[in-house]
Image (tube, helix red, strand yellow):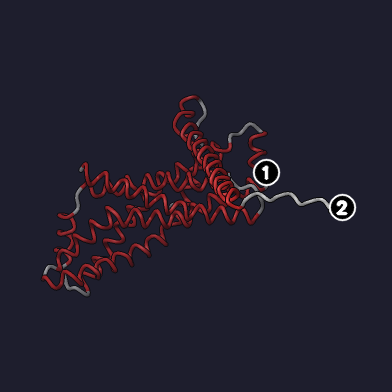
């Protein structure tokens, strides 16, 4: 009897796995290339509409910027004040635990003041703003993108970046440093409260020690970090919002991604500025 058709010989397994690995790697690289291109486009458009177009007759929406300042800055004052107060107390307690052994409790003022102004105040404020305002930026823009409102703005001849992102950027560039100043003052006050009550340090001595310990560059470096953090938080929130392609589930995923990415980049930027100030100041 004639035999049936023979099955085609299968390709060797050894030839399939390199193809699969290289294919997955190539798709990942292409996806990363697209993400970098989209991020660069948003950064370029934001810089143009914020710093260049006002000199060409396209003014910034200042009323919208003030509204964003109220939402992102003024409404964040209570939570930042409470957390900063507790952090100042905790920092003073931890410092006193070690300094008490050496009979140098007065240097609690130095540690609290310098640590808050140079590092803890800016980064703590940025993390709170990332979770509170950065996520709100991504959710707002993402919801508009899902509802095709962003496409409607483009159809009407309104640039979405100028209309949505620039007011938010101006708001955070101003309010994150302002909130950092509040965080520094309240945190130092928290350390002061602990020092004059539990540690029995004279109020005038603590105040004088803090003034002697702090330098202008300590405050300036913290505010410069805060200014950069505000830019990072805004751009990440806008990027994640404009990347929304689906419905509510995609908005939620992008909102979560905006918080995680913002905090990660805030730490990276903080490391960069800390190293820069360490070697050049």
Q: Which label sits on residue 148?
A: 1
Residue under pointer 2: 2
Quarter in which the C terminus is drawn: top left
Identify which residue is drawn at 21% across, 41% down: 280
Residue 125 seen in the figure: yes
Viewer-nearest residue: 256 or 73: 256
Identify which residue is drawn at 67% across, 34% down: 155
In the depicted structure, whether residue 68 falls above or below residue 160: below
In screen coordinates, is 155 left or right of 124? Answer: right
Dot 2, how many residues are within 10 Å of its Cα: few (below 14), some (14-19), or many (20+)?
few
- Secondary structure beneath label 1: loop
User: Percent x, y for residue 191?
Assistant: 25, 65
Q: Which label sits on residue 110?
A: none
User: Percent x, y for residue 7?
Assistant: 76, 52
User: Percent x, y for residue 48?
Assistant: 48, 31
In screen coordinates, is 250 left or right of 122? Answer: right
User: Percent x, y for residue 103?
Assistant: 11, 71
């Amino acid at each position: 009897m004639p035999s049936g058709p023979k099955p085609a010989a299968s390709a060797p397994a050894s030839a399939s796995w390199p193809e699969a690995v290289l294919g997955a790697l190539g798709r990942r690289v292409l996806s990363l290339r697209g993400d970098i291109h989209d991020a660069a486009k948003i950064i370029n458009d934001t810089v143009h509409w914020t710093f260049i177009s006002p000199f060409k007759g396209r003014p910034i929406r200042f009323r919208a910027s003030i509204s964003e300042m109220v939402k992102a800055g003024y409404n964040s004052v209570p939570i930042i004040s409470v957390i900063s107060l507790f952090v100042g107390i905790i920092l003073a307690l931890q410092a006193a635990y070690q300094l008490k052994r050496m009979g140098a409790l007065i240097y609690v003022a130095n540690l609290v003041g310098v640590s808050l102004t140079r590092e803890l105040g800016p980064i703590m404020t940025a993390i709170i703003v990332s979770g509170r305002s950065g996520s709100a930026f991504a959710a707002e823009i993402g919801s508009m993108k899902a509802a095709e409102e962003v496409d409607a703005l483009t159809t009407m001849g309104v640039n979405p970046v100028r209309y949505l992102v620039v007011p938010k950027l101006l708001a955070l560039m101003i309010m994150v440093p302002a909130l950092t100043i509040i965080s520094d003052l309240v945190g130092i006050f928290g350390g002061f409260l602990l020092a004059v009550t539990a540690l029995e340090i004279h109020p005038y001595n603590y105040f004088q020690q803090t003034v002697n310990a702090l330098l202008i560059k300590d405050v300036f470096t913290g505010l410069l970090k805060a200014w950069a953090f505000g830019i990072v938080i805004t751009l990440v929130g806008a990027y994640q919002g404009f990347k929304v392609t689906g419905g509510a589930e995609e908005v939620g995923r992008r909102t979560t991604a905006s918080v995680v990415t913002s905090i990660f980049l805030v730490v990276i930027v903080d490391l960069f500025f800390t190293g820069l100030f360490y070697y050049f100041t």
